[in-house]
Image (spheres, helix red, strand yellow):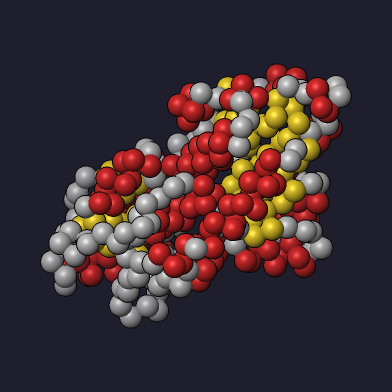
Amino acid sequence: MNYDKRSINFVLFGYYGFGNLGDELLCSSLVNELLHLGYDAETLRILVGTDDSTAKTLGITSLFRKNIFANIKTFLKTKVFLFGGGGIFQDEKNILSCLYYLFYEFIAKICGCKIYMIGQSIGPLNTKLGSLITCIAFKLASKVTVRDEQSKEYLDFHSIGSHLHSDLVLLLNNFDRSTSIDMSQNSYVLLNVRDGYANFAELVVKKAVNFVANSNLQLKYIAFSLGDKSEFERLIKVGFLPKLPVILVKNLDQFEAEAACARFALGMRLHFCILSAAFRLPISLCPYNPKVRSFAEEYNLPLLEDNTPAVMFRKIEQGDFNRLVAEKILLEQILSNI
């Protein structure tokens, strides 16, 4: 089909539809931006795993990943296949993730779609094959933006052009940063752990428990996925944490309500850290992954690691957000011209 006559402007692809709040916020942030730029909802599609609730909330038609042959029919009518946010090109646990996303990219490319990589982070890449697959995937893309300096350096090293901007959740949501709320009377420390990193999670909660014991504050457990909730339950069962309810946060409004009652935030997941910072909570980041460390270094936020003598907190000030205006203009220019 002639490119200009294709009826679908964008198919969005990421780790959507698996119950992870961070990835669902990446999806909704990007969709809302595309709608703001004038694209009709009927010309957008979202590829999801098993849960299409975000797509339904946004009023966007979803495509289930497993329906490959049905999806090909959609790709043949699509202008841009857009990888939207996240760190999907990594081989930390196995190489299959890289292969899977490259496979879908090949299908979209064969169907005549342009490939956009928007708001990506790269790695960890521990194998030569993982790095090769990632390079191929990004070289197939006509437009590339990344969310951290480390990913930009990786692409520069491999002679792949890209632009750098902040994470899509921070960039595309209108957080009220104009005032600094007095949180000095709040009594909660929001705590987040991530599943899959048991040893590091145990280190984090030990330090969190010691901190609140010496400060007359209380912990509040914040999960961004069912996996996080299970990890909290494990830590409670083995005695690392006191028995308290685990709050499974399902949307931005719910997190904002929890942040309004908190004094500090301490967490592992990147988007827990990003949202805490965006809502002006003093935060300490627990870098289970290079992307968390990159965000901390970018905004000069304290890290909590094995050799950290004491928990330190800092909030992002108004001036730290000034760069977002120019970054958003750049991204809107990229997305407006397809």
* Image height of 202 relative to 12, above or below: below
Give coordinates of residue 57: x percent, y percent.
45, 26
Number of numbered tags placed on the structure image: 0
Question: Residue drawn at (56%, 36%), measured in percent from left and top?
Answer: 36
Q: Residue furthest left?
A: 216
Question: Residue drawn at (63%, 66%), measured in percent from left and top?
Answer: 150
Give coordinates of residue 143: x percent, y percent.
75, 48
* Image height of 45 relative to 292, above or below: above
Residue 151 appears in the picture as rendered: yes
Give coordinates of residue 58: x percent, y percent.
49, 28
Using the rendered view, name the quadrant where residue 238 is placed: bottom left
Question: Residue drawn at (26%, 59%), measured in percent from left and top?
Answer: 181
Give coordinates of residue 168: x percent, y percent.
54, 49
Residue 126 appears in the picture as rendered: no
Question: Residue drawn at (27%, 45%), measured in percent from left and top?
Answer: 257
Closer to us: 76 or 94: 76
Q: Is residue 47 left or right of residue 180?
A: right
Which quadrant is home to the N terminus?
top right
Using the rendered view, name the quadrant where residue 121 is placed: bottom right
Q: Is residue 323 left or right of residue 101?
A: left
Closer to us: 200 or 219: 219
Closer to us: 23 or 38: 38
Which quadrant is home to the C terminus?
top right
